[in-house]
Amino acid sequence: MTTSITRREMLGTTVAAALTAAGIDWIYARNSVGRIVIAAGNAEDWKPILFNADQANSVAALCEAIIPRTDTPGARDARAHEFIDLQLSGEAEIQQRLFMEGLDWLEKRCKSEVRKTIGECSPEELAQVLEPISDTHDKHPDNLKDGASFFGNLKRRTIFAFYTSEEGWVQDLGMPAHPSLTATMEGCHEEPS
């Protein structure tokens, strides 16, 4: 009998092993010492910290293009875009600026290629725009290097966010629930209970 493993399973297993070894907890809010922990609340109540509404929608669409919903949840279900917004909000201004410039670059490319914003694209249209800047290419032409750098950064952030969520860890990988999955924040300045 042959057992095959998908790229998604390989990514998840690799990230899961690294997180387990590092003792990383779950995500979505900062406690009083700046540690990211799982947040209370639901997606409808979420307000971006760094992104505006359009940017948040674009990042959510891009995350979903990276890890789409299948028979298990996708990156949007795991609220990966919320984690990325929170993570970036605590990073150096130069990292924030580079991310936003990359997002703007990709938004312009999307409008040029398919005449739509990132958030308006179908999954197929978004795949068409992203393929030339994906890591399936060994080299990128000079005019695509900035986009490829941004997309690689976004992909790493998305994979981390997804596989440190209940959707990625438990529902996609089938791993046992981590004890801190049930710990929530009553407010951003309190320790998880």
Image (cartoon, rainbow, N blue to C red):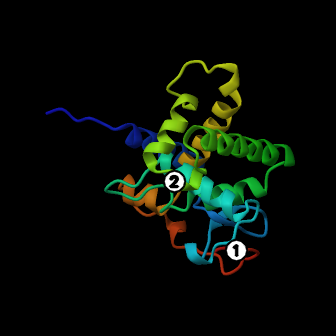
Q: In the current view of this chain or complex, which residue is farthest to the right?
A: 93
Which residue type does callout 2 highlight?
Phe
Q: Nearer the viewer, mark 1 or mark 2?
A: 2
Mark 1 residue crowding within 10 angstroms, few (<14) / some (14–19) / many (20+) = some
**In the rendered image of this protein, does residue 16 appear above or below residue 28?**
above
Q: Earlier in the sequence, mark 1 or mark 2?
A: 2
Q: Is residue 8 left or right of residue 192?
A: left
Please, what secondary structure does the residue beneath circle 2 have? helix
Measuring from the top left, give residue 179's x and y in whole percent. 50, 67
- Decide if residue 175 is in sight here: no
Question: For the point 34% across and 38% down, which residue is it?
Answer: 6
Mark 1 — residue? Answer: 191
Please, what secondary structure does the residue beneath circle 1 have? loop
* Rendering quarter of residue 177: bottom left
Q: Are marks 1 and 2 in contact (CB under 8 Å)?
A: no
Question: For the point 67% across and 60% down, which residue is it?
Answer: 54
Q: In the current view of this chain or complex, which residue is farthest to the left?
A: 1
- Decide if residue 170 is in sight here: yes
Which quadrant, please, contains the N terminus? top left
* Rendering quarter of residue 187: bottom right
Measuring from the top left, give residue 185's x and y in whole percent. 65, 76
* Rendering quarter of residue 7: top left
Mark 2 — residue? Answer: 162
**In the rendered image of this protein, does residue 116 appear above or below residue 134?**
below
**In the rendered image of this protein, does residue 57 appear above or below residue 149?**
below
Measuring from the top left, give residue 169's x and y in whole percent. 44, 56
Counting labels gives 2
**In the rendered image of this protein, does residue 100 appear above or below residue 191?**
above
Which quadrant, please, contains the C terminus? bottom right
Q: CA distance from mark 1 to mark 2?
A: 23 Å
